[in-house]
Amino acid sequence: MVKNHLGLLQPGQIATISQLHSEPGLHQRLLAMGFRTGRQVVMLRRGWLSGPLHVRIGTTEVMLRCREAREIEVTNVSVKA
């Protein structure tokens, strides 16, 4: 389990991706969507009752399952200005 992961962010928070801890198939899909080490990700919305997470990475907006977000390690968490 990743200690500080994308699934812990609240709407409006920004973080930097530090590592992907996913299985190979998901890892390739995340890379294709732009999830790479060093990229900033913004939490836009959280689904109700552990529903999907709506995030922005660059100019791309993506919906992720909570399970997938827990496999994306983040650092430098801050609030969007």
Image (spheres, rainbow, N blue to C red):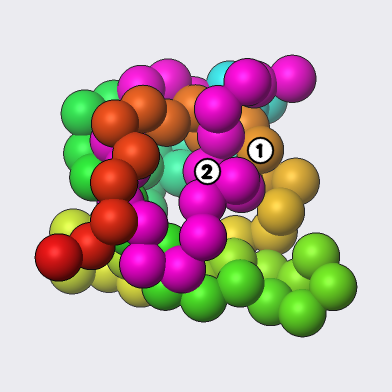
Nearer to us in this view, 37 or 42: 42
User: What residue is shown with label 1?
Assistant: 70
Marks 2 and 1 close (CB-CB < 8 Å): yes
Q: Quadrant of residue 19?
A: top left
What residue is rendered at 56% in x and 34% in y?
Answer: 5
Of the 4 image quadrants, the one containing the N terminus is top right
Circle 2 SS class:
helix
Q: Mark 2 or 1 closer to N-term?
A: 2
Density class for disc 1 (Cα within 10 Å; few <14, some 14-19, many ≥20) is: many
Task: Inspect this view and state whether residue 55 appears.
Answer: no
Q: Position of residue 73 (x, y in %)?
A: 49, 27
Residue 6 circle label: 2
Circle 1 SS class:
loop
Of the 4 image quadrants, the one containing the C terminus is bottom left
Q: Is residue 8 magenta?
A: yes
Q: Position of residue 26 (x, y in %)?
A: 60, 39
- With 1 as the anchor, is 12 left or right in this view? left
Residue 78 vertical position relative to residue 53 in the rendered view, above or below: above
Residue 1 vertical position relative to residue 56 in the rendered view, above or below: above
Q: Which residues make up the magenta segment? A: 1-20
What residue is rendered at 76% in x and 71% in y?
Answer: 51
What residue is rendered at 63% in x and 20% in y?
Answer: 3
Residue 1 vertical position relative to residue 5 in the rendered view, above or below: above
Query: Cα distance, mark 2 to mark 1?
Result: 6 Å
Q: Quadrant of residue 57?
A: bottom left
Task: Inspect this view and state whether residue 74 appears.
Answer: yes
Q: The disc labelled 2 sits on which kind of residue?
A: Leu
Residue 34 vertical position relative to residue 55 in the rendered view, above or below: above
What residue is rendered at 69% in x and 77% in y?
Answer: 47
